């Protein structure tokens, strides 16, 4: 008897939407090290976090006990406009590869921001509005987070200032246009609008910028502006908490259609989409009940997990943030201006870092040209132009599927397609024109970044 063919789109109904966010911190067998106040080197308190963040977000950041955290009804109403997002069987890609493997992808680009970032943007803007704030500041790398937060702030009637990494602002001017359409003020970073921006430019006038620089500028403005707070799109635990809706929907759909995964794959920069994608799967992995492997994919140009150090470091170049125990290339590391802007961050989320350090997840790195080769193949077969960030996952998924072609293994591979690449035409043009190059930092390059990791007792 022929095997029953699954539908191409493994859809959920609105009533199957998760009603809670999933908190990985509650199931870690050993909690990750606490964030430290940069002045006292003592664990950060709620009061410390409230200096920059909304109170409710600070509470979520410190919550290591509640496995499930209810999603407010107002946020659920917003989610229903864009969720549940589809889990798609990549039949056409499978056919083009001639692989016996089954490939599934969770598509998060089905909204104007073009990525998963809206899941946390609306939550953070909601809590800010509820607290009575009137404006927010943030940074953005490739522009997905800035676009998403612009949408959320417009929806809730809040002002927003976005510091966009300089090279990304130059590569993707239309991202800036979309953010401004939603009412945001967009400033390429580093800039002359902040003291830290002026300092960075004085030291390196030709810098292409980094997420660390942009974080510093956004933080400085937030702390000096009345009725304003800072929000961010990755790295911290509460962001991954909000993104857990991705993994929960994925898990529900797989169970609904009887698919047991062998490999879960997602790209990784600061950890938001990866952490959200794996969140509900990690408990079984920790308890030894899961047979599947979990694989993160990062760029060789910014290899925080595969070549970084596990240490306390600042989350920004200006050394204004709390110290986080994480895999890091050093807060002063300046990544090359490659096209995967959302993955150009010097460090990794503390939960993800802890899971990697303890061996529950694996990580690999890939170079830019091979990523775009995979992206083009995916676009030609599946009809979606993927973001450069998401295409890191596609590269590894294709490689794994081709291995199955050699062995005959019918592995079930599930990955997160975290966003679309329609604002990345310059990058695709360079790939098509064969002018795209790869950059892999040398050990000497990395040592310069490592030298900026703070010399504190906890790092001895």
Image (cartoon, helix red, strand yellow):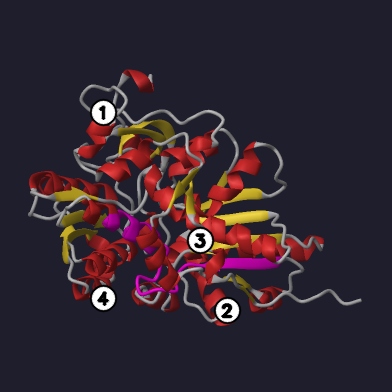
Specify the quadrant of the image occupied by residue 142. Answer: bottom left
Q: Which mark is residue 392?
A: 3
- Classify 10 Å Cα crowding around label 3: few (below 14), some (14-19), many (20 and above): many
Q: Dot 3 lies on which element?
A: helix
Helix or strand or loop: what does disc 2 sit on? helix
Which one is in front in this view, the residue at disc 4 or the one at disc 3?
4
Q: Position of residue 121 (x, y in %)?
A: 32, 59
Cα separation between marks 2 and 3: 16 Å
Location of the N terminus by quadrant is bottom right
Query: Residue at label 2?
Result: 382
Q: Is residue 446 above or below residue 157?
A: above
- The residue wearing badge 4 is 174
Q: Cα distance, mark 4 to mark 3?
A: 23 Å
Whether tag 2 and tag 3 are in contact, CB under 8 A, the answer is no
Please name the residue shown 59% across and 80% down the image.
381
* 371 in relation to 205, above or below: below
Q: Position of residue 8 (x, y in %)?
A: 65, 77
Q: Where is residue 416 drawn, in percent x and y?
A: 53, 62
Point 81% across, 75% down: residue: 4
Q: Mark 1 — residue?
A: 37
Could you give the CA–CA distance between mark 2 and mark 4, rounded to whole angstroms?
25 Å
Residue 272: % across, % down = 42, 52
Residue 43, by quadrant, is top left
Residue at 36% from the left image edge and 35% from the top image edge: 447
Q: Left of 420 or right of it: where is 89?
A: right
Q: Earlier in the sequence, mark 2 or mark 3?
A: 2
Q: Who comes first in sequence, dot 1 or dot 4? A: 1
Question: Gap in Å between the C-alphas at discs 1 and 4?
Answer: 38 Å
Q: Earlier in the sequence, mark 2 or mark 4?
A: 4
User: Which of the labelled discs sits on residue 100, or is there none?
Assistant: none
């Amino acid at each position: 008897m022929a095997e029953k063919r699954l539908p191409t789109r493994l859809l959920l109904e609105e009533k199957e939407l998760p009603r809670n966010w999933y908190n990985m911190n509650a199931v870690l067998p050993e909690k990750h090290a606490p964030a430290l106040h940069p002045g006292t080197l003592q664990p950060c308190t709620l009061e410390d976090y409230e200096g920059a963040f909304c109170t409710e977000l600070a509470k979520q950041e410190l919550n290591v006990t509640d496995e499930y955290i209810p999603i407010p009804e107002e946020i659920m109403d917003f989610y229903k406009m864009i969720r549940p997002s589809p889990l798609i069987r990549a039949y056409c890609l499978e056919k083009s590869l001639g692989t016996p493997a089954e490939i599934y992808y969770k598509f998060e680009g089905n909204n104007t921001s073009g990525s998963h970032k809206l899941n946390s943007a609306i939550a953070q803007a909601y809590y800010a509005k509820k607290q009575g704030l009137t404006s927010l500041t943030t940074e953005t790398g490739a522009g997905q987070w800035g676009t998403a937060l612009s949408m959320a702030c417009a929806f809730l009637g809040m002002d927003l200032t976005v510091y966009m990494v300089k090279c990304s602002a130059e590569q993707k001017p239309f991202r800036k246009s979309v953010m401004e359409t939603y009412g945001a003020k967009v400033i390429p970073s580093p800039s002359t609008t902040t003291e830290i921006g002026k300092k960075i430019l004085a030291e390196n006038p030709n810098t292409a910028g980094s997420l660390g620089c942009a974080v510093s500028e956004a933080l400085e403005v937030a702390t000096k502006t009345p009725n304003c707070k800072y929000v961010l799109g990755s790295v911290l635990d509460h962001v991954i908490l909000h993104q857990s809706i991705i993994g929960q929907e994925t898990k529900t759909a797989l169970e609904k259609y009887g698919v047991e995964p062998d490999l879960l794959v997602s790209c990784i920069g600061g950890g938001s989409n990866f952490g959200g994608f794996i969140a509900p799967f990690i408990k079984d992995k920790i308890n030894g009940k899961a047979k599947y492997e979990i694989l993160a994919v990062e760029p060789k140009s910014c290899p925080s997990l595969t070549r970084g150090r596990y240490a306390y470091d600042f989350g920004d170049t200006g050394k204004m943030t709390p110290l986080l125990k994480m895999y890091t290339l050093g807060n002063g590391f300046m990544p090359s201006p490659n096209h995967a802007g959302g993955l150009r961050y010097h460090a990794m989320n503390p939960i993800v870092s802890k899971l990697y350090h303890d061996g529950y997840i694996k990580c690999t790195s890939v170079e830019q040209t091979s990523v775009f080769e995979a992206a083009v193949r995916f676009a030609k077969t599946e009809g979606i132009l993927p973001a450069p960030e998401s295409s890191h996952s596609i590269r590894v998924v294709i490689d794994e599927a081709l291995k199955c072609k050699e062995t005959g293994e019918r592995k079930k591979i599930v990955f997160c397609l975290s966003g679309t690449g329609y604002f990345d035409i310059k990058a695709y043009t360079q790939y098509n024109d064969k002018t795209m190059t790869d950059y892999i930092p040398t050990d000497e390059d990395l040592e310069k970044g490592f030298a900026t990791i703070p010399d504190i007792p906890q790092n001895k």
